[in-house]
Image (tube, rainbow, N blue to C red):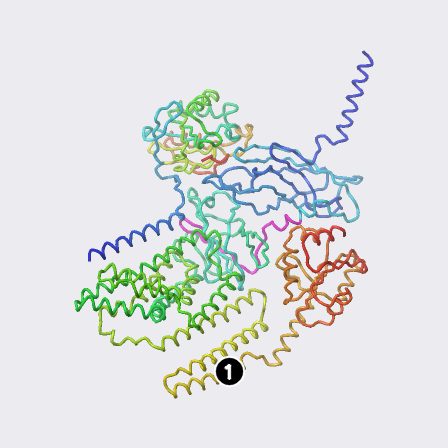
Amino acid sequence: MAFLVRSLIAHVCLASILLMASGCGEKSVSKGPHIEVKLIADQQTLTPGSSFRLGVHFKPEPGWHIYWRNPGDSGLAPRFAWESSGGVAVDAPLWPYPKKIAVGPLVNYGYDEVLLPFPATFSAPPPRATSTTVTLSLQYLVCKDECLPGEAQLALTLPISKTASAPSEYERLFALTEKKIPTSLERVSIAVEEQQDHIIVALIPLEPRFFPSTITFFPEDTRVISNSAPQEVSLDSGALRVSLKRDPNRRDAIKRVRGVLYSPQGWSESGEPKAIEIDTAPDGDVDGGAQRSSRSTTSPPTYAGAENVGFFTAIFFALLGGLILNIMPCVFPVLSIKILSFIEQAGHEHRKIKAHGLAFAAGVIISFWIFAGILLVLRAGGEQLGWGFQLQSPAFVATMICTLFVLGFLFLSDIALGSSIQRVAGKAKISTTYAGSFFNGALATAVATPCTGPFMGSALAATLTLSAIENISIFTALGVGMSLPYVAISYKPELLQRLPRPGAWMESFKQLMAFPLFASVVWLSRVFARQMGLEAPGLDLLTDLLWGLLTIGFAFWLILRARSASTILTQRALRSLALILFVVGFLKGLPSSKEIEGTRSRACLANEATTAEPDAFGLIWEPYSEARLAALVAQGRSVYLDFTAEWCITCQVNERIVFSSSEVRALIVQKNVALMKGDWTTKSPSITAALRRFGRNGVPVNVIIKKGDQDSAVVLPNILTPGIVIAELDRL
Amino acid sequence: MNTIRRLVMRACATLVILSAAIAAPQTARSEAVVGSPAPQFTAKDSTGKEISLNAYKGKVVVLEWFNPNCPFVKKFYKNGDMQKIQQDLGAKGVIWLTVSSSAPGKSGHLTTTQAETTRADLGMKSSALVLDESGAIGKAYGARTTPHTFVIAADGTLAYAGAIDSESSTDSDDIAGAKNYVVAAATNLLANKAVETSSTEPYGCSVKY
């Protein structure tokens, strides 16, 4: 019996010792139903007087989620209560941007897996303490279809050290999360306008900048906006406006609008940051000056006023465009036949002719309406994909350039546009009924489409950013413009005598139309170059060169056309004009030697100066220089050298493949690798020497130098994969 | 002329349909607004009886959105707190309708048998447990959470919409210290006074439409 009791006591003592040793009741990880929660820190040890980050890492099971600071239509945000055994003060959490979680017609804001960082400071610890413990009482709600409330008591003990502490194993996670925390946008004035049913958030840039087209607003406060209503995004006069439907049950004035504007495209060309925060009062004015009433249902702010003038100009040009469509060689011949025919058939009954004319016009206008309708439906669906601002996307600009270029050549060539349609149109029975005239009108529109290139292009571009009503008006104007001559002729058949007869002039006109298209190509190329980062004065010199090319091309065309001129006088005139244009073109295109020097030296200076701008993948590259490389090596850092050139396709492909891998980027951050780029696009003796040192005489050359050891340079193979780079980086 | 008129009318019709199609995504779902007449509805309850809001004109009506699986709802029913409020207000002539808008197959969906069993098990003291499996009543009122509560005045105007009380949590201990907005609104209405707090942000699990 005694033995049993003693062994029992021994077992209990052992168990309790073990329990205490494992820190039972003091753990940093909590496994709840469907979720694991961890309390972590970004440092391994704490230095007195230092700032660091604590973090609560939520990992729900797949399909389950937790909530943001504003959970949305339902749910509950997690709640935190901190306690420290000495010296640690914990601040409010930094909430990374959430995602929209739709539950039927309701909308929540939350996260799948997330780390919530908490800035913390460690001030004076108790005198002889060797470690400090932070405890967290946590309440949360984790949901899938069901919701489960959870509670956890987490504790984290960190040793105190006098010297600077090393980053913890979670440093990469903290770094990645840091990118998701909303920041503020520089050089942009943010204003909020309260209307009857909507709140408009307007971002007015103080200098030209990039705005994404797909944007979601996450409100920080509840009962401000309707979470499930669609958010309309529009761009006018360079200002971005997000229209949010108000919460119908909130009647009083809204004093403050706080929240996060998120775009998967990012708020700058580099793609980062993806979320920005806003915090403004509707009455307040960020650019100082004009007062805005808090319940304005009247006119929109002045910066939108300019848009109205633009709209009427657009209508005018649409009318003009419609008129010009008639001269297009693919429309004119077929239709004049048609009109003559219905006039003949109708005899001399003026009323009938007029009616035919109107029926024709109806056919044209309604076809344009159908086209506008299709466009709007596509846009409504594509709105989510961000169709509105395609002109800001370099990819779209490049596509437009190619399309216009091809169209231009089509106009120049003798390829008959839409010839099969024209043949059908010619053969179709000449109808005597009004329905026939209506369909002739519709047919005219269909036949016109291959020729509508420039006009449809600009109309399309203009209409992409306008509302539905404005869209339909512009297309109506196009239709009216196009049918105008026919209605006019049907009302006054005498005008037919005045119409020019088809002839060689039509072919010249068609070919001439190619040049406005090529002019658009030049202009868009400048836009494209700008978007790709080319700045003045290099940009201006390139543009001048392109205009020069166009002028020379036009001059050449004049000479070709002059051969079929009707009179010798016309021929001589055209030839002289061509000669003048040749000279002008050359002069414009070729830059003076002074301009070349000026631009080149500025580019060189730019190259050598340290650029702190991150590239498309968020990485910061230093330009290669022997001195800087030596300095980095002396500092004990690892260095990644990328020798590349604009004209080297393998180099560009390598860069894209390797640095788009998030693992590579994470490793670079983790191993603190310095990045250096040697740009060999233009002759550079220092880079040639460097290449030779690594045993090469061409590009691409990628080198990894291990921590501080210049002789450890590893030259990577010519064709790279992320795997190769990761393997080498891992060894650092 | 007739042909033209017919053509034009047909074209106009197409245009109208097209614009309706474009306009449709823009219109948000309707929501009952405090101060306006509360949306009418008729539905079957757990006993199979037809319940119609119209029938209760002249009485103060409370609508309580319900899901037996939601921890926020369980918080109130666990210790009898919700049942007590239902009974107290019922004694004062208030009609209390518990509504389930869970769609078939979704969490909390109740057939008539299950509804009756739940009513008995929980000891519900509401006048009826209305089954709205199509979600029509929920969507008409804009019910987002369980429990989302609405109080309708005797004249049919919506007087309160929002949370049941001021403590958004799943802990029953919070009920005692919280301000119950439904009781306050109903009391105001019964005393012919204006409702103090007419709208708050509802909390709870999402309604499973």
Compared to residue A247, the image places residue A694 above or below, namely: below
Question: To which quarter of the image does residue A420 belong?
Answer: bottom left
Membership of A179 in magenta stretch = yes
Pick whichever, A529 or A99, lies toward us. Answer: A529
Pick whichever, A126 or A12, lies toward us. Answer: A12
Q: Position of residue A348 (x, y in %)?
A: 17, 69
Q: Which residues are magenta?
A: A175-199
Crowding near the residue tagged with mark 1, few <14, some 14–19, many ≥20 C-alpha atoms within 10 Å: some
Membership of B60 in magenta stretch = no
Outermost residue to the left? A349
Q: Quadrant of the N terminus of chain B?
A: bottom left
For the residue marked with disc 1, what is the amino acid? Val
Residue at 58 percent of width and 79 percent of height: A591
Compared to residue A248, the image places residue A269 above or below, namely: below
Q: Quadrant of the C terminus of chain B?
A: top left
Pick whichever, A648 or B138, lies toward us. Answer: A648
Q: Position of residue A436 (x, y in %)?
A: 25, 60
Q: Position of residue B207 (x, y in %)?
A: 47, 35
Question: To which quarter of the image does residue A43 belong?
Answer: top right
Residue beneath disc 1 = A584
